[in-house]
Amino acid sequence: MVGQILELTRMGLSVHKRRGFLAVDAEGREAGRLGLDDIEAVLAASPGVMWSNTALAELAARAVPVMILGHNFTPVAVVLPLAGHHAQGERFRAQAAASRPLRKQAWAAMVRHKIAAQAEALERVGAPSERLRRLTMAVRSGDPDNREAQAAQAYWPLLMGRDFRRDREAEGANALLNYGYAVLRAATARAIVAAGLHPSLSLHHRSGGDALALADDLMEPFRPTIDLAVCRLVRGGITSVGEAREELIACLNADFPTKNGATPLSHVLLYLARSLATSFLDRKLRLDFPSRPLPDEVGGTANG
């Protein structure tokens, strides 16, 4: 069963544990509740939200990340558990000791799958993808030629229009992308913790004190799933996060074709994180990617 994303967006909310539920109160009354075991992640964008320590401890015990969103829905902080796997210590050591060549090979695999997903996203909206297909084949270990950036330069104008610029501070499509990526980042962080890996020990991303650098690495191949959903929303006239939330959260339920059959994105992320942990332990790269880079349906719209 795929868990649910809990959003906290209203003013003056307070969050508590009541029996086996996470309860949200507003103005002294219960406004809603979710079973603690049914929660995938919590996204908190509510000014003045108050938390009980018990609620945070219960979420941590279930490896549920709490993502704090700042201006324009960009993540600014995250609460994660200290322990998420029975063999965590061994896996942390193997992760920290991973050789540079292994990490470079893993990053190249992330970039290849990301660009392949971007190419397929372009094809689904009727845009040319030949350049990105060529770039996919040109990615070398560690991506020293920065094919990822070259692909992005070609990709965004073709997907979103010539005037589009990716800007985290901008409204409209950019705010939708921020929110969709926050949902994806939270799910990726949970998968990493569940696999016994440390979310700040990255393959590639270097962001100073970034606590989720590895999540930023592992989510890269799946960003185009969010991109395609946002593209379709914008083309349908939806440009506010309030209208788009449900569709963007639903991306975690989108089924990818895998060796295990149709598999929701939240589980695909877990399989990838587990395969990376095994790769660190065995010192040999064997990553578990879906058989196609995009789900069969994105944003509730069938491909055609």
Image (cartoon, rainbow, N blue to C red):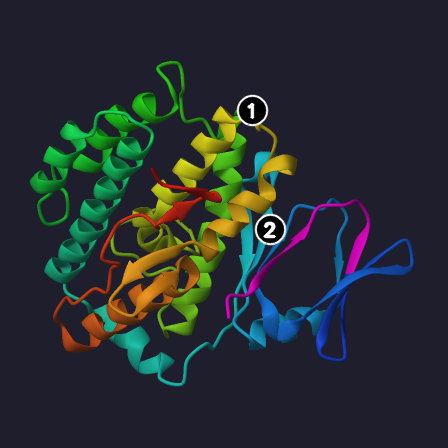
Question: For the point 75% across and 52% down, which residue is it?
Answer: 49
Q: 194 and 288: which one is in front?
A: 288
Q: Position of residue 301 (x, y in %)?
A: 45, 41
Q: Which residue is mark 2?
A: 68
> Can see residue 65?
yes
**Which label belongs to residue 93?**
none
- Is 7 within the magenta? yes
State the SS at label 1: loop
274 left or right of 135 in image: right
Identity, as a three-letter code, of the amino acid under mark 2: Ile
Extreme residue toward the top, this view:
163
47 in magenta: no
Give amino acid for label 1. Answer: Gly
Place residue 21 in its image quadrant. Answer: bottom right
Q: Residue at x 55, y 52 (%)?
A: 77
Q: Position of residue 281 (x, y in %)?
A: 20, 77
**First-in-chain label (1 vs 2):** 2
CA gap between label 1 and label 2 equals 28 Å
Residue 177, placed above or below residue 102: above
Crowd rating for badge 1 (residues with CA inside 10 Å; few <14, some 14–19, many 20+): few
Q: For numbered disc 2, what is the local secondary structure?
A: strand
Query: Which residue is located at x 43 percent, y 54 percent?
Result: 254
Q: Is residue 36 left or right of residue 207?
A: right
Occupied quadrant, residue 146: top left
Q: Residue furthest right?
A: 28
Tell which tag, 1 or 2, sits nearer the viewer: 1
Query: What residue lies at 19% left-to-right and 71% top-to-bottom?
Result: 279
> What span is colored magenta in the figure?
1-14
Image location of residue 238, percent across then percent down? 57, 28
Q: Which residue is mark 1?
A: 237
Q: Is residue 156 above or below residue 28?
A: above
